[in-house]
Each structure stands twice: as C-alpha cells, then as structure tokens.
Image (cartoon, rainbow, N blue to C red):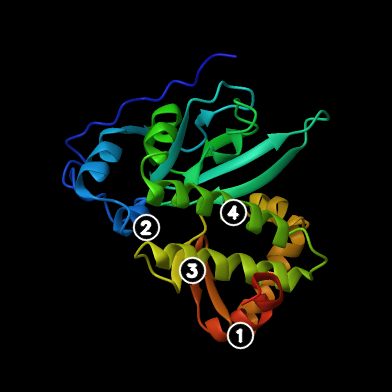
Amino acid sequence: MSTPTYPRLNTQVLSDDGDELQFCSTCAFSHACLSQGMDKSALKELHFLVEHVGPFHAGETLFREGDPFDAIAAVRAGCVKTRVIDRDGREHVLGFHFPGEVIGLNAIDGHRYPCDAIALDTVMLCRFSFPKMSLLATKVPGLQRELFRLLSRDIGRAALLAGDWSADQRMAAFLVGMARRLAARGFSATRFQLTMARTDIANYLRLAPETVSRVLRRMQDDGVLAVDRREVELLDPARLEVLAAPILRD
C-alpha cells in the first residue's frame, strides 16, 4: 500500500486562524493548549508540527484501509466519514468527524490505517506527524493527556451505540451528540446540517434506512425537530435529551 498523499492547502486562505502561540478556535488540541502543562515554547513546538492540507471534495478518500500510518489529522472544516468494507463488499460506517475532531487515532496500534476516511463535503485538515508528536508528548504532559482523552472518547462512542437501544433512542442520541460536539467548537447546538446521507446515518446507527426516515418524520410530527432537506432544527432539545439519556448516560 502506498502512503496517502494530501493536497496542500493554500495557506493564505486560513493564515489568520491561530499563530505560533495559539491554535485556531476549532483545533482538536485547544484543551492541551490551555492546560497549565503547555508553556509558550512547547506550544510553539506543537504548532510547528501542523501541516494544513486540502481541500478535499465530497467523495474523495483521505486515506484507505491498509495505508501506512504516519500521521493523525484534525478536521479543520467539513465532515469526514470513516468506514470499513467487509469481505462481502458491505459498507460499515464507523463514525462521522466534525471540525475540531481527530481522525487516524485508531491506526496507532497496527501502524496502518484500519479504515477508510471519506470527505462528505469540502474538507480541510490539520495534519500532525505522529512520530514527531509522540516525541513531543513525552516532554509535554498536557499533550499526552489530550491524546489519551481523544482515544477514550472514540472508544466510548463506539461502545455506547452497541447496546440494545430503540430506534428513537439511537436517533435522539445521534442528534444530541452531534449538537454537543458542534456546540463545543462554537457552532449552533440547535440548527445544523446533516452532511451525511440518510443511508449513512442508518448504517452507523445499525438501523434500516426506512426506519431512520420514519423516526425523523415522527419526531417532526411531534414538534421535537424540524427537517428541511439536510437542515435540522432541534425545536425541543429537552425531550431529545430525555430520550438520549440512557445511551449518553448523563
């Protein structure tokens, strides 16, 4: 397998986002930057590891299963789907990744990417050389803690969706989880676009596509949310939170 090739981003487009002492607001490592363990010199070292790459367009592959692993990437703009294809050619969606979230962490153990990453719309990435980041993490406790936090969050999401939950609970947890993740990066928590297809949502939630459509229609009829093509507005977030509570456990 060949090493994935990333198109370079025109740095003038995003040059005003962050500097050598502060990352852009959606950066996946903003928590580490704000931690007391990160002094200015360490932060500068981490910033020097960043390579802005993209844009990728809808349907383009960012990396493929089996490609050699040498970097993790933070989504800077757009949405990325991760998936695997089984021996029978069936797709299994593993997750969706929004601005400020990291892809490639599940490749650390095997030294090769264990899945495909596909752009769902126009995607831009911040690419971090993992060997260099690992070396820096041994000197910067805040960065090491952030890597562990990102790993545990991904594992937790996968485990929670594996339970014996109803279709309504799964859909509510998906919408509430998406709202929280977007809100954490400064986006609206009640109005956003579903950049992924209904079939992808169904695949991820382990539901039939017609079930996803039926649940969304019922929630809309009940006044819980409004759907206009791919745009969703949460009209009654509290009711969704109650439905999602058994899965999200908070």
Q: What is the distance, in whole Å, between disc 1 and disc 3 at their CAs?
A: 15 Å
On screen, residue 199 above or below 247: above
Residue 220 image-quadrant placement: bottom right
Q: Amino acid at mark 4?
A: Ser
* Residue 142 in the figure: left or right of residue 220: left
Placement of the C terminus among the 4 image quadrants: bottom right
Q: Amino acid at mark 3?
A: Arg
Residue at the far front in the pictured view: 139
Q: What is the distance, in whole Å, between disc 3 and disc 4 at their CAs?
A: 17 Å
Q: Position of residue 68 (x, y in %)?
A: 56, 21
- Element assignment for label 3: helix
Q: What residue does disc 3 label?
A: 180
Q: Nearer the viewer, residue 178 or 105?
A: 105
Mark 4 and mark 2 lie on one chain; the one further toward the N terminus is 2
Q: What residue does disc 2 label?
A: 31
Mark 1 and mark 3 lie on one chain; the one further toward the N terminus is 3
Q: Residue at x 66, y 78 (%)?
A: 245
Mark 2 and mark 1 lie on one chain; the one further toward the N terminus is 2
Q: What residue does disc 4 label?
A: 152
Q: Amino acid at mark 2?
A: His
* Residue 117 in the figure: left or right of residue 123: right
